[in-house]
Image: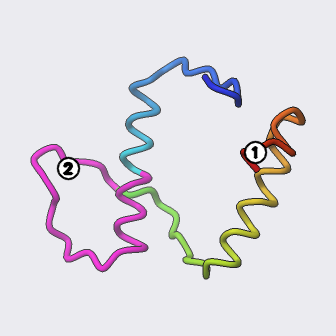
Amino acid sequence: MGIFKVVVEDPALIKEFDARMWATERRDLMNWDGNRWGADDFAEPLEFEIEPLGPYEAADSFLKRFHEIAPPDVVGTSLC
């Protein structure tokens, strides 16, 4: 899948965890009143808590991690 060559073996599992991550972000990062956002809003948040970062700290953390895991042919391109 794309430049990171991610192989998706179980799309349903990816979708489930994506929805749970979204529910976790909503719980921890938004001023959420607890009401569901739709009939299909069923996902339960993950067990951990997201600790928000400021914009510069978040950018620095993201770029450090990106350079740790990105394929060498991607680092240094216009994607970085």
Q: Name the residue under label 2.
A: 41
Give the image quarter of residue 69.
Answer: top right
How packed mark 2 is, by other alpha carbons closer than 10 Å (few <14, some 14-19, many 20 or more), is few
Residue 66 lies in the magenta stretch:
no
Report the front residue among 37 and 77: 77
Q: In the rendered view, would you say 39 is above or below 47?
A: above
**Residue at x-position 81% and y-position 60%:** 64
Give, as a single range, the part of the protein colored magenta. 21-44
How packed mark 1 is, by other alpha carbons closer than 10 Å (few <14, some 14-19, many 20 or more), is few
Main SS of the magenta part reads loop
Give the image quarter of residue 1.
Answer: top right
Residue 25 lies in the magenta stretch:
yes
Mark 2 element type: loop
Horizontally, residue 30 falls left or right of residue 69, namely: left
**Residue at x-position 56% and y-position 76%:** 51
Horizontally, residue 21 falls left or right of residue 74, namely: left
What is the number of callouts on the image? 2
Dot label at residue 78: 1
| The residue positioned farthest toward the left in the image shown | 39
The residue under label 2 is which amino acid type?
Asp
